[in-house]
Amino acid sequence: ASSTISQMGLYPIPAKSELNIDLTLVKAEKVTVSIYNLIGELIVTNTHNLSDGFNNIKLDIEKLKDGAYICKVRSTDGQMARKFNVIK
């Protein structure tokens, strides 16, 4: 089966204090958004109830230090990951 998440976009990159995640879902679903550093440590995680179609999530990343991170979005049947940079 294909994942519920059909598209995922992250912006702005580099990010400063807020990260936008655009997600297109094929059905309404609860997703978990997690941010990891490059050595795999979990920095922050949140759960969001999203509707089918287009969704926008705004993440407060004010506390993240400069560097590279991975944003993972997990649904019940799959996950997507995107790398992004933070520059203050």
Image (tube, helix red, strand yellow):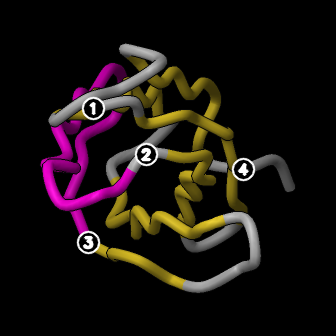
Q: Determine crowd level at label 1: few under 14, some 14-19, many 20+ residues with C-alpha closer than 10 A.
A: few
Residue 54 inside the magenta-drawn segment: yes
Amino acid identity at mark 2: Asp
Quadrant showing the C terminus: top left
In this rendering, the count of numbered labels is 4
Residue on which the image places disc 4: 3
2 or 4: mark nearer the eye: 2
**SS class, disc 2:** loop
Q: Which mark is residue 66?
A: 2
Asked whether disc 2 touches disc 1, contact meaning CB atoms under 8 Å apart, the reply is: yes
**Residue ID at (14%, 49%):** 62
Task: Indicate the quadrant where residue 44 lies.
Answer: bottom left
- Expressed as whole percent of the image width and height from the top left, the position of residue 79 reads 69, 59
Residue 16 inside the magenta-drawn segment: no
4 or 1: mark nearer the eye: 1
Q: Nearer the viewer, residue 63 or 28?
A: 63
**Residue ID at (43%, 30%):** 23
- Determine the residue located farthest toward the top in the rendered image: 12
